[in-house]
Image (cartoon, rainbow, N blue to C red):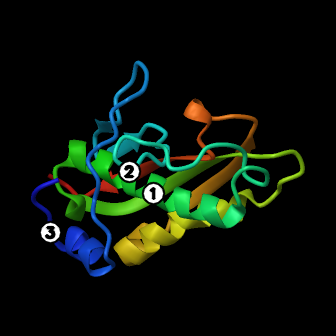
């Protein structure tokens, strides 16, 4: 994506490139703005149009790998926010993160997996990245993705 300010400079400093917005796989849009808030759709860890891993966390996918995938989901969510906000520097704060983890029976490490997303927001946005959060274990996710993340951000005034 072109353009960018301090947030994208921070991403570059961390060696992270903001991806293009992941195209929807069904009948929805990647993000919707309502007033000062942007709500993203659930973002799976697509990289270059491909899902880098599939399956259940605690079975086919290790918790450590799932945490890395949650970080990718968070980056995809930031790309979705930028697509409707125009500039990531307009993020006043990340308000809420909801993470879904496709979990093998008995797997209870969902919070640690979703820390991948939460830590990315903190690394990139500092105090503005601190948020309320839910981490939920589910039976299966679209495309057999191991993890999915959605966020709500508040923007600064226009």
**Secondary structure of the residue carrying numbered label 1:** helix
The label shown at residue 157 is none
Q: Which mark is residue 76?
A: 2
Q: Is residue 137 above or below residue 126?
A: above
Residue 143: horizontal and vertical position, in percent?
A: 56, 32
Q: Disc 2 or disc 3, which is closer to the eye?
A: 2
Find residue 80 and report its horizontal and vertical position in percent: 31, 45
The residue indicated by pointer 1 is 72
| Image marks 1 and 3: residues in contact by CB distance under 8 Å | no
Residue ID at (38%, 50%): 76
Q: Quadrant of residue 88?
A: bottom left
Point 20% across, 75% down: residue: 9
Report the Cα–Cα distance between label 1 and label 3: 20 Å
Q: The residue tagged with tag 2: helix, strand or loop?
A: helix
Name the residue furthest right: 106
Q: Would you call the spot at circle 1 few (<14 residues within 10 Å), some (14-19), or many (20 or more)?
A: many
Q: Please, is residue 23 above or below residue 114 in the view?
A: above
Q: Mark 2–mark 1 contact, CB under 8 Å?
A: yes
**Residue that mark 3 sits on:** 5
Please provide percent x and percent y for residue 64: 66, 67
Q: Nearer the viewer, mark 1 or mark 3?
A: 1
Cα–Cα span, label 2 and label 1: 6 Å
| Residue 59 vertical position relative to residue 126 in the rendered view, above or below | above
Give the distance between the C-alpha atoms of the residues marked 2 and 3, in whole angstroms: 18 Å
Compared across the picture, whether 102 is left or right of 52 comes to right
Q: Residues within 10 Å of mark 3 (few under 14, many from 20)?
A: few
């Amino acid at each position: 994506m072109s353009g960018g300010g301090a947030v994208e400079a921070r991403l570059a400093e961390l060696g992270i490139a903001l991806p293009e917005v992941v195209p929807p796989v069904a009948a929805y849009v990647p993000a919707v703005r309502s007033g000062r808030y942007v709500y993203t759709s659930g973002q799976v860890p697509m990289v270059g149009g491909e899902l880098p891993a599939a399956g259940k966390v605690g079975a086919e996918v290790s918790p450590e790998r799932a945490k890395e995938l949650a970080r990718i989901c968070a980056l995809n969510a930031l790309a979705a926010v930028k697509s409707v906000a125009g500039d990531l520097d307009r993020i006043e704060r990340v308000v809420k993160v909801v993470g879904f983890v496709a979990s093998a029976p008995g797997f209870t490490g969902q919070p640690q997996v979703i820390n991948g997303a939460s830590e990315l927001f903190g690394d990139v946005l500092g105090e503005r990245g601190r948020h309320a959060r839910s981490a939920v274990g589910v039976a299966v996710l679209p495309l057999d993705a191991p993890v999915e993340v959605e966020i709500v951000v508040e923007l600064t005034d226009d």
